[in-house]
């Protein structure tokens, strides 16, 4: 007689009908390859941008941060040792390991090695995020870390996907979607009167190449978009916990709505991770209705140590879920927050408030001897954020342009830029190569400027006629001075 769960002391394996979910083998493949691809992009972005942002000579240097913030507050291997070379090694090693997993290396090694590989990725990226300060203060950093831990609990081809882990992934997706829906409903009145998308496509942090066209959709369609968003985020997530095929249908709705967001803007890897998490609710039968589903490998029984790890992870999640649940049902919901230093079981949300007017900080320099009214000022161009009104918005997501994103916050209030904006301007005056690599256009390729300044502009999308006749995507109007002209002393220049 076979028991629902049978442990064999000799082999240390577990046979349990309730534990394994072989019908989700293909979902696991999509999840692990996809999350590894996002990790690859995250490590590559960190490696390419850190020197100017966080390096020893960066705007917010890591050595200064770890000197004042203890390990227990921000656990990171960089508390043990930091150098720019070591940070770069962590980034490129993380990218290489993530790339190997994308290629399927985790299915070619023993289960314990695959588990250790995911743990290594998580430790590496947690170490970066926890010393990343303002540059890494985004909800999708915690989302990637939380998803990475759950990938470690999904196993590999040696064992069927654990059902508990799939439920944990759905619970994570629920918090992402439902938290975002709640913060909107409780926040800006325009979400309740369905008018937020009259402004959002124009004022979002980094518009994409299609954002201009989304903005010019008819207003009744904007109302339908907002209403559909409320349904997708406040109603549909409950369907993830229903039996099939309801769970797969709910997941498909999440995927479609997230693809709509991918097309309409640049939100780093937030939307792509959300899409990947939705596959935790899609079984083989649902896959087979759309595409031919390959046969699953023949897994062995789950090792006892791995089953214990999954059960411990599930139990820990239940305990840690108290804080995000209390946050969601509380009167003062936080939009994105972690409740522990390991950034596990977080709360999520986005755009509780939508701006009605877009402001942009434009940085300029001049090589004139004095910043007189006759001085010729030339504008620095950013890679992603709006600048030249004739420049079409670019698609960058899922790659994260950290300086460009922080410039959007700087335009909302100088308080967001107090720590790093002055150091940024100083590095432009020095012609710092690492800083200049963050920009799309350097108007002073031969020598740095004598003076730099920053001005605040109001940006608005052009009309159909203006785009057609002038090939201009934006109209902009000067609001005022953001930072007056500054220069360096003779000693600093030398």
Image (cartoon, rainbow, N blue to C red):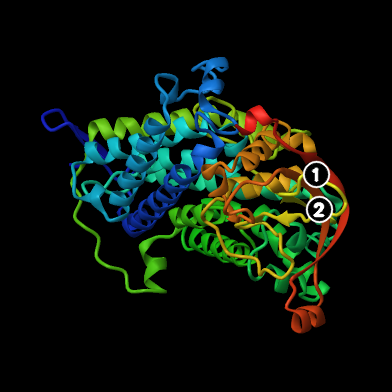
**95 above or below 314?**
below
- Residue 245 in the image: x percent, y percent? 48, 63
Q: Earlier in the sequence, mark 2 or mark 1?
A: 1
**64 above or below 158?**
above
Mark 1 closeness class: few <14, some 14–19, many ≥20 residues within 10 Å: few
The answer to whether any part of residue 333 appears in the image is no
Cβ atoms under marks 2 and 1 closer than 8 Å: yes
On-image quarter of the N terminus: top left
At 63% from the left and 43% from the top, the residue drawn is 428
Residue underneath mark 2: 375
On-image quarter of the C terminus: top right
In depth, the one of 212 and 172 nearer the eye is 212
At 53% from the left and 25% from the top, the residue drawn is 341
Q: Is residue 346 left or right of residue 485?
A: left
Residue underneath mark 1: 370
Q: Is residue 34 left or right of residue 159?
A: right
- Residue 371 in the image: x percent, y percent? 82, 45
At 52% from the left and 44% from the top, the residue drawn is 433
- Residue 158 in the image: x percent, y percent? 21, 47
């Amino acid at each position: 007689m076979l028991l629902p769960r049978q442990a064999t002391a000799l082999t240390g394996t577990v046979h349990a009908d309730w534990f394994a979910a072989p019908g989700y083998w293909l979902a696991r493949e999509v999840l692990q390859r996809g999350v590894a691809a996002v990790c690859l992009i995250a490590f590559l972005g960190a490696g390419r941008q850190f020197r100017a942002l966080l390096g020893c000579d960066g705007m917010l240097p890591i050595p200064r941060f770890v000197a004042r913030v203890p390990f227990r507050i921000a656990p990171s291997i960089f508390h043990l040792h930091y150098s720019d070379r070591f940070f770069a090694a962590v980034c490129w090693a993380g990218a290489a390991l993530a790339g190997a997993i994308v290629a399927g290396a985790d299915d070619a090694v023993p289960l314990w090695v695959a588990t250790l590989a995911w743990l290594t990725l998580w430790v590496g990226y947690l170490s970066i995020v926890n010393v990343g300060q303002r540059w890494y203060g985004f909800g999708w950093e915690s989302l990637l870390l939380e998803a990475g831990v759950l990938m470690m609990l999904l196993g590999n081809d040696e064992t069927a996907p654990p059902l508990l882990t799939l439920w944990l992934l759905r619970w994570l997706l629920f918090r992402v979607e439902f938290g975002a829906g709640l913060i909107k409903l409780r926040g800006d009145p325009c979400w309740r009167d369905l008018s937020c998308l009259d402004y959002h496509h124009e004022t979002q942090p980094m518009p994409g190449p299609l954002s201009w066209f989304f903005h010019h959709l008819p207003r009744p369609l904007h109302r339908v978009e907002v209403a559909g968003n409320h349904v997708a985020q406040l109603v549909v997530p409950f369907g993830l916990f229903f039996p099939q095929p309801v769970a797969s249908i709910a997941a498909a709705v999440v995927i479609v709505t997230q693809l709509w967001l991918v097309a309409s803007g640049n939100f780093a890897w937030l939307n792509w991770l959300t899409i990947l998490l939705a596959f935790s609710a899609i079984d083989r039968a649902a896959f087979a209705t759309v595409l031919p589903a390959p046969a699953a490998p023949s897994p062995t029984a789950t090792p006892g140590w791995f089953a214990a790890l999954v059960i411990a992870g599930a139990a820990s999640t239940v305990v840690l879920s108290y804080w995000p649940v209390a946050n969601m049902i509380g009167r003062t919901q936080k939009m994105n927050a972690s409740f522990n230093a390991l950034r596990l079981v977080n709360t999520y949300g986005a755009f509780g408030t939508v701006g009605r007017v877009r402001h942009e900080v434009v940085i300029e320099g001049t090589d004139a001897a004095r910043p007189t009214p006759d001085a010729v000022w030339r504008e620095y161009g950013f890679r992603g954020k709006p600048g030249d009104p004739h420049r079409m918005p670019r698609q960058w997501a899922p790659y994260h342009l950290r300086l460009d994103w922080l410039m959007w916050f700087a335009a909302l209030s100088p308080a967001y830029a107090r720590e790093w904006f002055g150091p940024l301007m100083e590095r432009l005056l020095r012609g710092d190569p690492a800083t200049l690599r963050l920009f799309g256009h350097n108007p002073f390729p031969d020598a740095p400027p004598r003076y730099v300044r920053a001005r605040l502009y109001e940006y608005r999308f052009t009309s159909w006629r203006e785009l057609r006749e002038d090939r201009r995507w934006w109209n902009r109007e000067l609001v005022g001075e953001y930072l007056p002209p500054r220069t360096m002393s003779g000693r600093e220049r030398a």
